[in-house]
Image (cartoon, grey):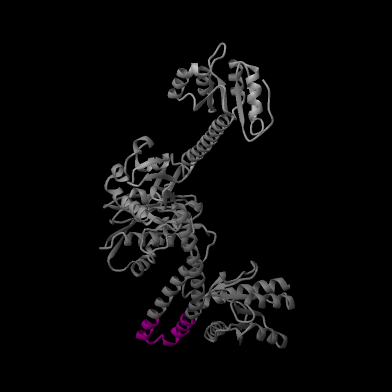
Amino acid sequence: MSDGAAGVGTILAVDDEPDILIALEDLFEDSYRVLTTSRPAEALEILRAEPDIAVVVSDQRMPGLTGDALLAEARSFHDAQAILLTGYADITAVIAALNRGGIVGYVTKPWDAGLLRSTVRQAFERHRLGRDLATERALLRGLLDHAQDAISFKDAQGCFVRLNARKAALLGHDVAACLGRREDELIGAKGAPIAEVDAASIRAGTVAEALISDGPTGAEQWTYVTRVPIRDAGGAISHLAVIERDVTEQRTLEARLRQSDKMQALGTLAGGIAHDFNNLLTAILGSLELAGPRVADQPRVQRLIENARGAAERGASLTKRLLSFSRAHDLQARAVDVNALIVGMSDLFGRSLGGLVTVRTDLEDGLPAVQVDPEQLELAVLNLCINARDAMPEGGTITVATRRLDIAGDPEIADGTYVGVSVTDQGTGIPEEILRRVCEPFFTTKAVGQGTGLGLAMVFGLAQQSKGRLAIDSEVGRGTRVELALPFAAEAPQQASAVAGTAPATGRRARVLIVDDDPQVRHVTASFLTGFGHSTTEVGDGEAALQHLQRDRCDIVVADLAMPGMSGVELAAAIRERNPGLPVLILTGHADAMQIPEDLPVLAKPFRSADLADRVAALLDAADAGSR
């Protein structure tokens, strides 16, 4: 065996006559890498060791193994193209080998050099094309087998000629069962629109893209479909490639992002509105409180004032919920009497749910307090009631109930006894495929503009943060029951330290500097404090307050948080720098408007006169104690 120079490809020459091998090597060494051997057995070994051999040129008559038999055995494990060199006496064997496909050609001895070169060149080109085709098939097979997309190829009549397992699974069959059949044959009437779109794409002759959805509202599966017409050598469209990509998760993320941006904007707007509204309510409620004693002898006017006060206080409650919506904050869990909280929501149910539904309560007596954030629990119950109302467009009864729960063996919650708070409706119910997703943030089945998809997500988050559980039981056409399980509190609920009308703690008379850019709020604040014996000075901004403090002394400063030019926090910092012992109380309608130092006392608007007097008295007492 000899090894020729490296060339564009490798050929193997097999002949038992050394002179023939030398002649063959001389003929091809300029164009190919030539391997030679005089023994058929060694030729088989070379082929096993050299997978890149492109052409085998073999003599027919050789001791031990004829050429056609050698090439037939080689073909069982190698893809090299085979050419026989033979005399006229062996032409019958050669023809038989050609008919069996064992060889691609033959050349008689003595050969014509040009003919032999041409035959080898054609065989080499055939081998190269075969290799390229095999590579393309392997790439296509790898793409089809491992792509996350559903990929298929159809002929001009819409029949499948190739598809991957993912596409076959979508059709409910295996790959073999789909080949040669149309999509509407496999999935029935549902496939008819697909066949029409395929035909339209073939007629148009251009790449077509479409986004389609399938499934019930709120649980759609979104698919991005690309159709690519494929032309044959003559330019006619012979096949259609269809690529289907599941973009449900992407669409969901995009929707969540849009909803998140919208909610952030709404939260900012809600905070600003609540701040301004709280200033108005401070002036309204303060003026009503100041006017009350002056008409004590006029019962009809007193009733009018009480009606106005009640409406304003409901406005304050709604504003508080608006602020709760506009911010994300840690839960302030404490012991809560759930039954009392639900009873206290009766007016809120009436105002929020409309007249088509009736709210019925079924509250178990003697339940212990639960450990939860009362504001968030109230908001959770209200959200559940709103969902229940929306599930009953024709009206019906919503039942809000409490009970004692003994839970064991639930992986989501520790074994023990809990208080269950449930909201039950008689509505449309929730399908199983939607029920699995109802607690996802921003997931909603309501029409655009009618739901944020945050209601149940907020309730679910409250249950988890409170170390409780949320359970939903629903049947289509029968209604839905949502129940929160909440842990017992270690302590009894705290009673309110003061009720409306209770006199505040008395303290020493003081000189109070009031700083607020709203003259109505400033006037009410000053009137409250004057009524408790304090002397007051009013200014409209922080700079004026600092100028006043340079001229005159005062015992305490009461300042609004959000003011133009200088905020209440900045004013407090400037005062502490100049007079560290002078107490400052911040009044605000929106505590999250800016960062407030933890050691800076804050009173939320709107406030009662007693609340203001108590805070001022406590700060004065603390200042007096610190100066001793």
Pinpoint residue 331: horizontal percent, then vertical percent: 52, 59
Figure quadrant of the C terminus: bottom right
Quadrant assignment for the N terminus: top right
The stretch drawn in magenta includes residue 515: no
- Residue 58 position by quadrant: top right
- Is residue 587 found left or right of 440 in the rendered image? right
**Residue 177, horizontal then vertical, whole percent:** 34, 36
**Can residue 365 be seen from the camera position used here?**
no
Whether 37 is drawn above or below 164: the answer is above
Whether 285 is among the magenta residues is yes
For the record, the magenta segment spans 283-305
Magenta stretch, main secondary structure, is helix
Image coordinates for residue 5, horizontal then vertical, percent: 69, 30
Residue visible at 50% across and 22% down in the picture: 76
Residue at 50%, 27% in the rendered image: 105
Residue 533 makes an appearance in the image = yes
